C-alpha cells in the first residue's frame, strides 16, 4: 500500500485566498468572472492545458470521502477514502486528462514526498527558489513545505500550477486545501520545488535523454543527484544522494553498465542514461 500525507493540519492556506490576492494584482475580474491572469495560460502544450482543465472541473469539491478519494481507494484500498487527498487529486486529474505517464512517472501517488522524489529521480525536478519559481509553467506539479526548508523529505502538500504570476508567486489549483479543491496564490517561501511533466504525447524518457548532460567522477549538481536516485532504484543502497559524483557512485554506474551490456567506463552519457531509465 502506498503511503499518504498524514499531517492533516498542514493542508491549509498560507496566504490570503486567491480572489483577494488577484483583485490586488489584476483588478476586477471580467464579466464572466475570469481574472486577466487566468488568460495568460499557454496553450502550447495540449497535455498541460488538459491537466489544468481537468483540475478546474473539481473546483468546489469538498469533504471526504469524495469522488477523488473513492476512485483512488478503488485501486489501493479503503484506507484512502478519508486520507489526506491533495496528491490523490493530482493523480485523478492526470488520469482523467490522459496525462498519467507525464505526471506520474512511477504511477499513482497519495504521498507527496514520494511523488516529488519521482520527479527528482527522472531529472524533472526544479528547486523552489524565487528565480526557479519564476521559470515554472502552467501544468507543472508544485510541492509545498510549510516549514520553508525546501527539503523534499519535508514536503507537506501539492498542487498544479495554473498561472505564473512573477515575483516568485504562482496561482495554483489544489486538492485538500481546507479539505476542498480551491485556487490558491503561493509564494516561493513555501514552495519546495516543482516537477515538470513531459506533456505533448511523447515518451518522457526519450525526450529527457536527448537533453541530459554527460556526467563523470567529480561532477556535482542536481543531475548527479538524479543519477544517484536511479542507482538506488537499481538496487545500489550503498549510493547516497549527495549530488557529488564520488567513487561509490562511479562504481555503481559501472555495475549498472555491465548489467545493461554497455561499456563500463563509469561515464553517464546518452547510452548509460538510457540503461538507468530503461529506455529501449
Image: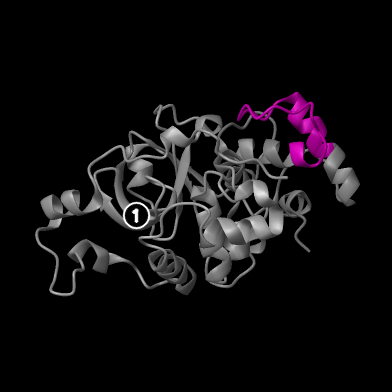
- Quadrant showing the C terminus: bottom right
Residue 244 sits inside the magenta stretch? yes
**Foreground of the two, 244 or 1:** 1
- Residue at 59% of width from left, 46% of height from top? 115
Residue 71 sits inside the magenta stretch? no
Hey, which quadrant is residue 13 in on the image?
top left
Part of the protein shown in magenta = 232-254
**Foreground of the two, 104 or 173:** 173
Q: Position of residue 140 (x, y in %)?
A: 45, 55
Q: Position of residue 4 (x, y in %)?
A: 60, 41
- What residue sits right under mark 1 in the picture? 182
- Residue at 53% of width from left, 54% of height from top? 65
Hey, which quadrant is residue 37 in on the image?
bottom left
**Foreground of the two, 59 or 262:** 59
In the image, 28: left or right of 120?
left
Name above or below for residue 115 compared with residue 278: above
- Quadrant showing the N terminus: top right
Q: Is residue 1 visible?
A: yes
Residue farthest to the left, as pictured: 27
Name above or below for residue 179 compared with residue 147: below
Q: Position of residue 54 (x, y in %)?
A: 45, 68
In the image, 93: left or right of 174?
right
Amino acid at each position: 500500500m502506498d503511503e499518504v500525507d498524514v499531517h492533516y493540519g498542514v493542508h491549509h492556506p498560507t496566504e490570503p485566498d486567491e480572489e483577494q490576492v488577484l483583485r490586488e494584482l489584476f483588478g476586477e475580474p471580467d464579466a464572466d468572472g475570469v481574472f486577466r491572469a487566468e488568460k495568460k495560460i499557454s496553450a502550447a502544450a495540449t497535455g498541460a492545458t488538459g491537466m489544468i482543465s481537468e483540475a478546474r472541473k473539481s473546483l468546489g469539491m469538498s469533504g471526504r470521502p469524495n469522488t477523488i478519494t473513492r476512485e483512488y481507494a478503488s485501486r489501493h484500498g479503503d484506507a484512502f477514502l478519508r486520507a489526506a487527498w491533495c496528491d490523490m487529486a493530482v493523480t485523478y486529474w492526470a488520469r482523467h486528462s490522459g496525462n498519467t505517464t507525464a505526471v506520474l512517472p512511477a504511477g499513482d501517488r497519495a504521498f507527496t514526498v514520494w511523488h516529488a522524489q519521482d520527479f527528482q529521480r527522472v531529472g524533472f525536478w526544479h528547486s523552489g527558489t524565487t528565480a526557479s519559481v519564476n521559470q515554472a509553467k502552467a501544468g507543472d506539479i508544485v510541492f509545498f513545505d510549510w516549514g520553508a526548508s525546501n527539503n523534499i523529505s519535508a514536503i507537506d502538500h501539492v498542487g498544479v500550477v495554473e498561472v505564473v504570476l512573477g515575483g516568485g508567486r504562482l496561482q495554483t489549483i489544489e486538492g485538500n486545501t481546507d479539505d476542498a479543491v480551491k485556487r490558491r496564490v503561493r509564494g516561493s517561501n513555501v514552495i519546495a520545488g516543482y516537477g515538470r511533466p513531459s506533456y505533448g504525447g511523447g515518451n518522457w524518457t526519450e525526450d529527457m535523454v536527448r537533453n541530459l548532460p554527460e556526467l563523470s567522477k567529480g561532477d556535482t549538481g542536481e543531475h548527479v543527484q538524479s543519477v544517484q536516485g536511479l542507482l538506488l532504484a537499481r538496487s545500489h543502497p550503498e549510493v547516497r544522494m549527495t549530488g557529488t559524483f564520488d567513487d561509490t557512485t562511479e562504481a555503481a554506474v559501472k555495475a549498472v553498465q555491465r548489467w545493461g551490456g554497455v561499456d563500463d567506463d563509469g561515464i553517464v552519457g546518452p547510452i548509460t542514461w538510457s540503461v538507468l531509465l530503461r529506455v529501449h
